Amino acid sequence: MTQQDSSPSNHFPEFETKMSEGGVSDAAIRSFQRNYESLLRDESGLISEDSITPVESLPKLSEIAEKNESFDPELLAQTVVIKLNGGLGTSMGLQKAKSLLTVRGDKTFLDLIVQQIRYLHDTTGASIKFLLMNSFSTSEDTLNYLKRYAAHGFSEAEEVEMMQNRIPKIDATTFRPAEVPENQDLEWCPPGHGDLYAALAGSGWLDKLLDQGVKYAFVSNSDNLGAVLHPALLRYFAESNSPFLMEVTRRTDSDRKGGHLALRKSDQQLLLREVAQCPDEDLNQFQDISRHRYFNTNSLWIRLDALKKVLEAEGGSLPLPMIKNTKTVDPRDPSSTKVFQLETAMGAGIECFAGAGAICVERDRFAPVKTTGDLFALRSDAYCQSADGHVALSDDRNGKPPVVTLDPALYKLVDGINQLGQPSLVGASSIEIQGPVQFENGVVIEGDVSVINSSSELKRVPKGVLKDETLEL
C-alpha cells in the first residue's frame, strides 16, 4: 500500500458519502472521521504506567448520603435518565433486545426500568425525562413492548427513543468502505457506547433537553438493575458543579483484567485505562488491584450544558480513544473479507471534561447480566426487589454476589438455565453445575457447592440443603 493510498483524505470522502446517504448524523460522521484518521496514523492508544499515577482515594457514596434522604423534586425535574439499550444478548442465544429478557418472575429488565421511573414520578410528583438509546437491532422490539405503557407516555419513539448510530466497516486491506453487495447490512456495525455523545447531539435531543431546562443526565446500562437514580448522588452532582461524574467501585480479584481509573501525570486529569491500552511490560501493575483500586461501573452523570460546550470546542465530537477491532465482514464466515470495526467507550469521556470527578459506590449498584450465570444468580433469592423497582443483593450477602459456574455445553444459552429450576442462593458462596441437572422446588445451597452429573441422562436434585459439598448424581 503506498503512502498516498493510506492518506485519510483519499478515502474518508467515500465513508462520508456512504454515511450521509445512510442517514447518519453529522456529529457521528465527525466522530468516525476522528477515529478513522487515528487508525491511518496507526495510533496504539497505549497508556504506560510511568505516565499515570494511581487514584489513592475517592469520596464515597456512603459518606455523602444523609440518612433517609429523599429526592429534591426540583432537581428531578432537571434530570434525564438514559439507558443504553442497543444490545441483543446474542451471546446468551437471544435474537431480540436483551432488555426484554425476564429477570424477576415475569418482569423483564424493561418492565423494572419503567417501574423505577414511574415510582419516582408517583412519589415525588416530578416529571422525569427518560430516554432509551436503542440500536437498529433493538428499536422495533423495544417500542412494540413499550406499547403496554402507552398511558404513561412510554410508547412513542419521539418521547423515549434516541437512536444509536451505525458506522461503516473498513476493509482492512484497502482502508475503504467494506462492500457486501448481496447483504449490505453486513457493511455496517455499531460504534460502541461512546456513541452516546454523538447520538445526543446528532439526534437533536441534547438541544431539546437543554431547552426544556434539563441539566443533568444519569446514564447506565439497561442490563444493570442496580443502577438507579439515587437522591444523594443527584444532590452531590448538582452541588459539585462538576461537568462529569463517574460511579466506580473497588476492584476485586475477578476484576484484574478490567479497566481502571488513573490520574494522568501531565495534567492530573482523570482517565480510564483498559487492558488493551496497557503495554505488555506494565501488565502486572495493571492487574495489581491494591495499586489501581477502582473500576468504572458504566454509570455516569453528565452536565448537558458542559457537554454542549465541549462538543462545540472539539468540532462536534469528543476526542475519545479509538478501539480497533479486527473481524471478518461476515462474522459467521471466517473466510470473508477482513475488516476493522472502530469503537469508543462511553466512560473514556471522563478525560474530555476538565474538572471531571468520580465517586466510589457500593457493589450493589453494579449488577450487570453478561452471562447466564449472572442471570441465574439474579433470578434467585440472593437478590431482592424493592417497591421502587430497584434490584439489589440481599442484605445477608454483605455486598458479595454468589459465584456461579455453569457447564458451558449445556447452560451457555438462556433456554438451558430455564430448565434448571431455581434453588435458594442467599446463603451460597459459590455453586458449580456440571451435566444435565434439574433442581426440584425447595433446594437450598449454602457455602461452596458443586453438583455434578457425569452422565447424559437428566438427574434431579431433591428438596433439601446442600452445604459445602460436592453432590455427584
Image: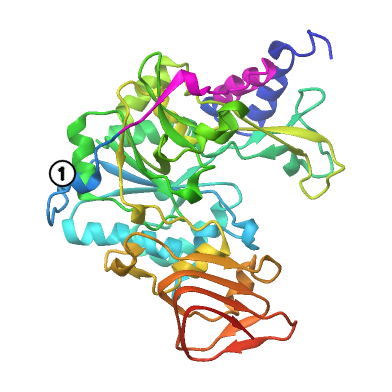
Is residue 35 inside the magenta stretch?
A: yes
Q: Residue at x 63, y 81 (%)?
A: 437
Task: State which quadrant residue 354 falls in.
Answer: top left
Amino acid beneath label 1: Glu
Report the span colored magenta: 29-56
Q: Position of residue 280 (x, y in %)?
A: 62, 29
Q: Quadrant of the N terminus?
A: top right
Percent coordinates x, y for residue 335 in the rendering: 87, 42
Front residue of this view, candidates 88 and 147: 88
Its colouring scheme is rainbow
Q: Circle 1: is it few (<14), some (14-19), or many (20+) Cα within 10 Å?
A: few
- Image vertical order of residue 152 relative to residue 270, above or below: below
Q: Is residue 235 left or right of residue 95?
A: left
Residue 59 visible in the shown view: yes
Provide the residue designation for mark 1: 74
Classify mark 1: helix, strand or loop: helix
Quarter of the image with the C terminus is bottom right
Image quadrant assignment for residue 187: top right
- Residue 115 appears at what percent x and percent y? 33, 63
